[in-house]
Amino acid sequence: MTRTADDSNVVLKLDRITKIFGALTANGDVSLTLHRGEILALLGENGAGKTTLMNILFGHYVADEGTVEVAGRDGGLRELEPGSPHAALEAGIGMVHQHFTLAENLSALENILLGTEPLTAWKSGRAKATRHLDELMKRSGLTVDLNARISSLSVGEKQRVEILKALYRDARVLVLDEPTAVLTPQESDSLFATLKKLAADGLAIIFISHKLDEVLTASNRIAVLRGGRKVADQPTAGCDKRQLAELMVGKSVPESTRDKQSPGAPLLTLSKVTTGTGRDALHSVDLQLLSGEILGIAGVSGNGQGTLAKVISGLIAPLSGTMELDGQPLGQTDARKMIDAGIARIPEDRHKDGIVGAMSVAENLAIETIRKPENQRFGFLRFDAIAQRARDAIKGYDIRCQGEKASARLLSGGNIQKIVLARTLDANPVVVLAAQPSRGLDVGATADVHRRLLEARARGAGVILISEDLDELMRLSDRIAVMHRGHLSAADKTETLDRGTLGLRMVGQTKEQAA
């Protein structure tokens, strides 16, 4: 079906989209329009229906009701074939996922060409493709070495390759999911400057983000989903962070702030710790965590932060160097010894390392303390006590599930993180290792994570906060150090730092070198 839109600038129309999974209405009667040259920010809590809506647009899901229409070359809107990613690509819809879909062993050019023509035609078409991409890069500002292997590129460069893939396929609508989640501030600024340039050339853009500052800076219009339904659709001008947070959550969201507090004695000390190989190696790392402080660790993903977290949690042993807790050498470490010593962790990958999906909520809450007297007696598990503590945690942490016996794998990412928080913090640990604790969480869940980390600091625990979100680090940390290629800088007081300085350190530069 083809029709001419009243507004010739409309390039995409989602009309009364409904998608139901069992008892859950993921999308309920959602309508959206997107105009040529417009940047639309799509907001909502975890589980609000944003991803489902975009999966329907891109053909991964089929809507139970409603239609998707895309402008053709003549400007008229045509109904998009449901459930067909190929039809979406052919209609000019491109999508850049938060986790990139690139072949690390191929070059940037080969990744861009994948799927556009038969492999046998690659050699003959490379020169033409390179010329076309050179023109695209010149026009968009998305510069990248086309001959470089993907594994050798930075995170920001990989993202440029993903966007170039979409532009090479003549995308007229570009969807980006959490586009700045792993970028430095400089890379984020560069990305949004590029997006605005692309929009000025006529590209229509939808981006999903939980970072309200960038939403207000980069978008022309904002749509908010809550509980699967659209609750707002308005120009960005005139919006503020508090208003958007309330629209997303349905109530006011208090922002946690770090009070001034004098730290205590050293809790955890690493001296000249070296371990690992290649990009994951640590090189002679020194670290000192004080009681009653939050020590922030900044860095671009893949610079050794993951290895540092594994060393502190006992999953990897140092090849050289020493570790002390409360002035006492830890010696040979393992995960059980670290837990028993009072070092608790919030892992970076909550799905892989934070829970056992086949276990219940109660079992996951008890898993790290299962040997303690409150959970067993004479070798027999105390099921009633385990269940009661789980019910208390579900209430105290607002874990949204069907009771303590619910399977953990059925929960959303935000609720899985609440299980991890309850298990970690209710044990009153001496040291809390929090790796990317709010990644992918909505504004309400993030505020809860921040509040609880500050509460741990207030009672005297030491918190190591590893994060790629500089706003989070600046808000919560007393001191911040930077990891770059396995080296950890000295920690400076947060009040002496700014986002620009940290961003430069994250890529191994100083202000003088950048100038």
Image (cartoon, rainbow, N blue to C red):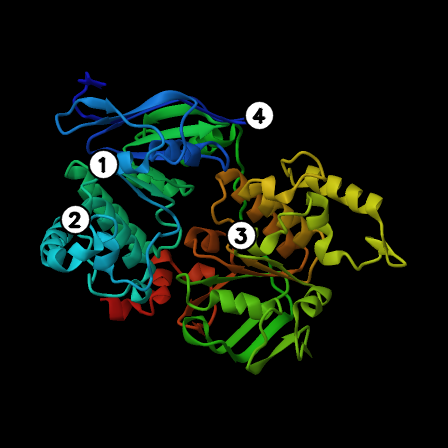
Residue 68, image x and y in percent? 31, 25
Q: Are marks 2 and 4 in contact (CB under 8 Å)?
A: no
Query: Hey, what amino acid is under mark 4?
Result: Ala
- Give the residue number, with chain letter if any, for mark 4: 23
Residue 193 visible from this viewpoint: no
First reached walking from the N terminus: tag 3 or tag 2: 2
Q: Closer to the camera, 380 or 331? A: 380
Picture residue at 51% right of the left edge, 78% below the top: 275
First reached walking from the N terminus: tag 2 or tag 4: 4
Q: Which is closer to the viewer, label 3 or label 4?
A: 4
How far apart are labels 3 and 2 at the CA level? Answer: 34 Å
Q: Are marks 1 and 4 in contact (CB under 8 Å)?
A: no
Picture residue at 47% right of the left edge, 27% below the top: 228
- Give the residue number, with chain letter if any, for mark 2: 140
Tag 1, which secondary structure?
Answer: helix
How far apart are labels 2 and 4 at the CA level? Answer: 45 Å
Tag 4, which secondary structure?
Answer: loop
Q: In the rendered image, which quarter contains the N terminus?
A: top left
Q: Closer to the camera, 488 or 50? A: 50
- Give the residue number, with chain letter if any, for mark 3: 437
Residue 452 visible from this viewpoint: yes
How far apart are labels 2 and 1 at the CA level? Answer: 21 Å
Tell me if mark 2 has few (under 14), some (14-19) or many (20+) residues whose alpha carbon lies within 10 angstroms of its own.
some
